[in-house]
Image (cartoon, grey):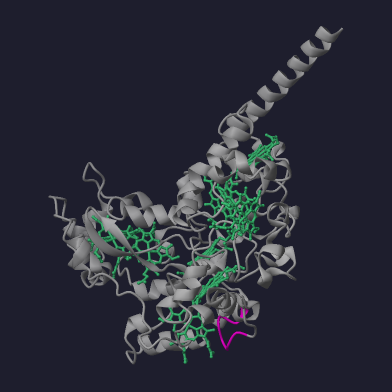
Amino acid sequence: MKKLIWGTWLIVTTCLASYYGYTLFKADNKEALLIGDASHGHFQIEMACTACHTSAFGGTESLQESCVNCHAEELEEAHDSHPQKKFTDPRNASQLETIDARYCVSCHTEHQKEQTNPMGLTLPKDYCFHCHQDIGEERDSHKNLTFDSCASAGCHNYHDNRALYEDFLLENHQDSWVKQVAKITEANAASTLAAQFIPTPLPPFAEKKEEHPDIHKDWSSSAHASGNVDCAGCHSTDQLQWIEKPGIEQCQTCHMNEVEGYQAGKHGMRLALNMAGISPAESSLPFKEQSLVLQQSCNSCHEPHTSNTQFASKEACLGCHNDQHSLAFEASPHGQLLNNAIAGRLPANEAVSCATCHMPRQEKNHHGTKVIEVNHNQNHNLRPNEKMIRPVCMQCHSLGFSIDALADEQLINNNFTGKPSAHIPSIDWAIRRSEN
Ligand code: HEC
Ligand code: HEC
Ligand code: HEC
Ligand code: HEC
Ligand code: HEC
Ligand code: HEC
Ligand code: HEC
Ligand code: HEC
Ligand code: HEC
Ligand code: HEC
């Protein structure tokens, strides 16, 4: 009898697993098997089942591998405060009984959109309690705090605490709210990268220049022209045939890092899986009516023949985005700085555009040369928003002001018009502790 139950169980699970496996990997109608809508972070790739379910029988381990594949680098870069290795330490084993923190899915499961909190979190807000019950006894400052306040803006995060370390708070508590020298990193001179492109003999496509004098004119005064990237740089196949509409593959031959960044964020994540770019019509965020027919690509922000980066840094964004925060930018103090810069009344790197915050310039190593590149993953520093403090706000503001401003929801809604309404005491506590 026991054997029969075993046998039946085995057959049933094998059939089920094969069915799931078949559907996940082969069948056209994957939607039928979807057990619930994917979270805010993953809805774009919901139908790419095998991006996460890398193996039909792999269970938790294979899911874990997929999370790590796409996210390990960013967590490492963030000096993750709770990496898996902290929990494989036998001394911490008892903590795993309630939350098995070795696995991402213990805190970020999928297909439960209704129960998913911001940042893909599927845990109640006071979960720090399970492992840090004693903190109130250990630190006077923490005595009367509730556990749902640990990770609300400005104090701690689970993964990324780079802007909130105690010694960092102490080092940076003295600046005035706007620094004496308030400006962002200078962009590279066009020649820095251009020097690497030795023009190979490509067809001149002279007839195309004649047929399209407007395009020829735009291109002539662009960074591509001064970098010796002729029409063929983008429009030629390997067989030297004309491509009428170059796509991301063409840009990629010269701009690998930008493409990589782009494909790691919400704008380009689908292209990383060879899916069609996301359209505003598919998103639940508010978008301009006329943008609903568009689809994400490099050309969404870069008019291909002028490649005007000033246009890309605000106007392009507002061609699509239509939420309260985006619309408030124009009238904000930062927006006015930008208008002054566009009018030539202020050096460009003393102004703030949408891109200053969402696509900041960062130093990268390019075949041994240090270059300043724009981070094309606009989700890289978006959430938790303390990620913006070090690379963005602190170029111009004090640490304390930046923490307070980013913790203020009203300021986010009005795109930073006015002073923060509340003060986060982290710095004060750190100072008091250092004096004791
Ligand atoms: C972004 C990653 C991701 C994508 C894409 C994804 N899933 Fe999942 N799926 C998960 C996670 C995480 C779980 C939960 C595992 C857990 O909690 O142990 C899960 C659970 C499931 C389960 C329950 C059985 C199990 O293995 O636990 C099914 C069935 C399933 N997914 C089907 C699908 C199908 C069908 C698709 C494509 C239409 C899909 N999934 C796309 C991440 C994903
Ligand atoms: C194919 C690559 C890919 C895989 C596989 C993948 N993710 Fe993601 N994930 C992304 C991208 C792209 C985003 C959106 C950009 C961002 O928020 O960084 C994202 C967003 C997130 C977010 C933030 C959500 C938000 O709303 O801010 C979390 C948390 C997350 N993923 C966890 C996981 C976990 C856990 C797994 C494994 C079950 C997983 N991811 C698998 C690519 C992936
Ligand atoms: C014990 C719970 C827990 C575990 C385990 C966990 N996370 Fe998180 N994760 C969080 C919390 C809480 C947040 C919200 C932001 C914060 O506090 O850092 C978050 C945010 C994120 C984000 C978006 C914000 C950011 O800092 O990038 C990503 C991506 C992410 N987690 C990926 C992962 C991956 C991948 C794993 C597995 C290697 C994992 N998480 C394991 C709790 C967890
Ligand atoms: C599953 C258990 C677990 C959970 C949940 C958890 N932690 Fe931890 N935390 C640990 C362990 C283990 C350490 C390492 C302790 C050590 O090394 O002595 C740690 C270390 C820390 C540290 C010191 C960080 C460092 O860089 O050294 C802080 C701060 C912290 N946790 C805050 C939090 C906050 C805030 C939350 C909730 C958002 C949280 N933890 C949730 C287990 C957990
Ligand atoms: C930096 C890459 C790049 C360079 C250099 C470039 N183009 Fe283009 N061009 C594009 C892209 C991308 C498109 C496709 C736009 C789209 O998909 O609608 C395009 C579209 C076109 C089109 C067809 C669509 C239209 O707007 O009429 C013509 C014709 C054209 N380019 C001519 C030229 C000529 C002539 C030159 C040289 C003077 C040139 N291009 C240089 C990227 C480039
Ligand atoms: C054959 C190589 C090559 C290709 C293909 C190429 N570019 Fe470029 N791109 C360059 C060079 C060289 C520069 C100038 C270097 C610099 O500005 O640092 C440049 C500069 C740029 C700039 C900055 C303009 C500025 O004013 O600073 C943008 C934006 C740009 N490219 C976008 C694109 C897009 C989008 C595509 C695909 C449609 C593309 N490029 C294809 C080589 C290329
Ligand atoms: C969401 C809008 C947006 C999209 C989409 C976009 N870019 Fe950009 N890109 C910008 C902005 C804004 C700048 C300039 C920011 C600055 O000057 O600080 C820029 C700058 C650049 C530069 C100048 C060099 C650098 O990194 O500093 C290159 C090259 C470039 N983009 C290539 C690309 C390519 C290739 C794609 C497609 C994979 C792409 N961009 C998609 C907004 C965008
Ligand atoms: C062609 C239209 C288009 C343009 C142009 C555009 N975006 Fe987006 N943007 C989108 C779409 C679509 C999404 C994905 C929304 C989603 O996942 O629900 C998105 C997502 C984002 C997000 C992430 C939102 C989130 O909740 O995770 C940010 C931030 C963002 N865009 C900022 C910008 C900035 C800054 C610019 C200009 C430099 C810009 N966008 C240009 C269409 C556009
Ligand atoms: C001073 C920095 C700053 C500037 C300038 C800025 N933003 Fe933001 N943006 C933020 C912060 C901070 C958030 C909120 C992140 C969070 O906590 O969720 C945000 C959120 C967003 C979101 C996500 C909204 C959502 O509901 O998911 C979009 C889209 C966006 N910004 C677009 C833009 C556009 C477009 C512009 C320019 C017109 C712009 N932002 C200017 C800092 C900035
Ligand atoms: C390029 C420098 C620069 C960067 C980067 C920058 N700001 Fe500002 N910000 C300023 C200047 C200058 C002002 C004052 C403008 C004025 O007086 O009209 C300002 C004004 C503000 C204000 C409005 C204060 C008021 O009295 O109305 C807030 C809030 C603010 N910034 C927050 C931030 C945050 C948060 C970040 C990072 C996400 C940030 N800023 C990034 C330069 C910058």
Residue 403 location (% of width, % of height) = 55, 76
* Farthest residue, direction right: 1
Residue occupying image coordinates x 54% and y 39% = 66
* Farthest residue, direction front: 436
- Which quadrant holds residue 9? top right
Residue 271 or residue 419, whichever sits in front: 419
Please determine whether, in this image, residue 347 is positioned above or below residue 20.
below
Residue 350 or residue 270, whichever sits in front: 350
Magenta span main SS: loop
Magenta segment, which residues? 413-420
Please determine whether, in this image, residue 120 is positioned above or below residue 162.
above
Residue 77 location (% of width, % of height) = 44, 55
Q: Is any part of residue 47 visible from this angle?
A: no
Please determine whether, in this image, residue 372 is positioned above or below residue 15.
below
Residue occupying image coordinates x 53% and y 74% = 434
Q: Is any part of residue 284 visible from this angle?
A: yes
Q: Is residue 290 left or right of residue 146?
A: left
